[in-house]
Image (cartoon, rainbow, N blue to C red):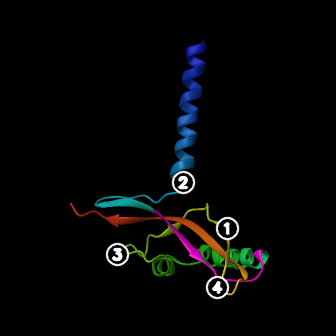
Amino acid sequence: MKLMKTTFTTAALILLSGNVLAGQYINTYGNFEERLDTRTFHTEAVSSKQEAYKLGLQQLHELDNSSSQELNHKLLVTGDSSNDIHLNKNGYVTVQEFMNDAGQILYKGEVNVSYHYAERRDD
């Protein structure tokens, strides 16, 4: 009975995990393979940490609402994959503090995104 219960639990976990993990990525058929990559964008320098977060969040929302063609241009992806680029749902914003040559403390927002796309294989 214990073996049957363990087998059933393992099978259920595999089935449920497969759906969760596969739902985030695109299907690649034929002579294509999936590519995953990350990119960090920087906002302009501002005088407050709060403003840097605000600018970073605006930029993240702009990326989230971009079409595949716009993402291709913004992410600088080469090749013929412009219709297949998709952002993953784990983008986030951080803030970098720095001092310029005049001695002012400034802040830049850093927008971190990961994305995936299908690329033709060269077999």
Question: Circle 3 is placed at which residue position?
Answer: 80
Which stretch is magenta?
37-49
Dots 2 and 3: beta carbons under 8 Å?
A: no
Dots 3 and 4: beta carbons under 8 Å?
A: no
Q: Amino acid at mark 4?
A: Asp
Query: Which quadrant holds residue 56?
Result: bottom right
Q: Amino acid at mark 2?
A: Gly
- Quarter that holds the N terminus: top right
The answer to whether residue 30 is above or below residue 68 is above
First reached walking from the N terminus: tag 3 or tag 4? 3
Say what secondary structure mark 4 lies in: loop
Q: Name the mark nearer the viewer: 3 or 1.
A: 1
Would residue 37 appear left or right of 30 to someone viewing this image?
Answer: right
First reached walking from the N terminus: tag 4 or tag 2? 2
Q: Name the mark nearer the viewer: 3 or 4.
A: 4
Q: CA distance from mark 4 to mark 2?
A: 48 Å
Q: Name the mark nearer the viewer: 4 or 2.
A: 4
First reached walking from the N terminus: tag 2 or tag 3? 2
First reached walking from the N terminus: tag 4 or tag 1? 1
Q: Return the residue nearer the eye: 48 or 75.
A: 48
Q: Amino acid at mark 1?
A: Thr
Question: Circle 2 is placed at which residue position?
Answer: 23
Q: Around disc 4, counting alpha carbons within 10 Å, would you say few (fewer than 14), some (14 to 19), or many (20 or more)?
A: few
Extreme left residue here?
Answer: 123
Question: Circle 4 is placed at which residue position?
Answer: 101
Asked if the stretch drawn in magenta spans residue 54, the answer is: no
Q: CA distance from mark 4 to mark 1?
A: 23 Å
